[in-house]
Image (tube, rainbow, N blue to C red):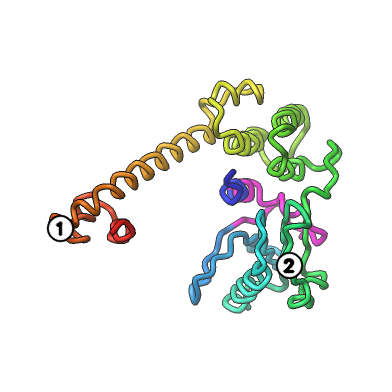
Amino acid sequence: MKRDSIYYQIFKRFPALIFELVDNRPAQAQNYRFESVEVKETTFRIDGVFLPPEDATPKVIFFAEVQFQKDEGLYHRFFTESLMYLNRNQSQYDDWYCVVIFPSRSLEPNDKRTHRIFLNSDQVQRIYLEELNTSDTQPIGINLMQLTIASSETMAEQAKQLIQRVKLEEISTLPKNEIIEIITTIAVYKFSSLSREEVEAMLGITLEETRVYQEAKAEGREQGLEQGRDEILKVAVPLLLETGMSVEQIAQQFNVAVESVEKYR
């Protein structure tokens, strides 16, 4: 399940969702925008930056990280990236907060001492999705995020119930069709081995015309083409090199980067 891609889509369409999780909710939470930002002096990329609207007072920026695997270097990287971004844009913001989202407490880095100045402050909030209340009294956004960590056995029913809840409730934060598309995105990736008809029956909706289904189909075709091309290169490159062709000539012949050929020398 491609959670990085899913969370990017969730936050891009629904940036206010992050503020349903954190304690320090800004006054203009509904007007924030979500971006993925590159820190040009290094190879760092900050995946989740929530930027305040131009007329916000004060201007508070939120950095977010969604971590679904164990990474002992997470805090080193995340706080470094955030502070480097602040250094480059120090005149644009009045305050900042960091939010780190884990599916469970067990995936948090073991070393919590090195960065205790941040972790023990009110500027950093850690969220453990499995510890949040799962009842229907929670905001839909939180139930949506919990859906990403649901087991295969329970996810279908949770997704179906959430879709019904979205259809019945009054929601002001995001159009209902957008929320249903996010639920669909999670289901399509979670059950990638199922046919469209099987996913439709499971969720009780029609997928064929939805944006997520078309995107998933396109992504699947692209991945299939890449895998097929790699298989061809794996066999062809050694044979063509023996005929005297250079790496550059082979790359030109197959219309690929030289690096793609080099790995099969």
Task: Say whether residue 202 is left or right of residue 224.
Answer: right
Task: Say whether residue 143 is left or right of residue 83.
Answer: right
Residue lying furthest left: 244
Tell me the tag on residue 5. none
Q: Quadrant of residue 151?
A: top right
Looking at marks 2 and 1 on the same chain, the residue that comes earlier in the sequence is marked by 2
Which residue is the site of mark 2?
A: 97
Can the viewer see residue 89 in this picture? Answer: yes
Q: Quadrant of the C terminus?
A: bottom left
Q: x%, y% of residue 251?
A: 23, 55
Can the viewer see residue 53 in this picture? Answer: no
* Three-letter amino acid code at the position of disc 1: Met
Which residue is the site of mark 1?
A: 245
* Three-letter amino acid code at the position of disc 2: Tyr
Q: x%, y% of residue 115?
A: 74, 76
- Residues in magenta? 9-34
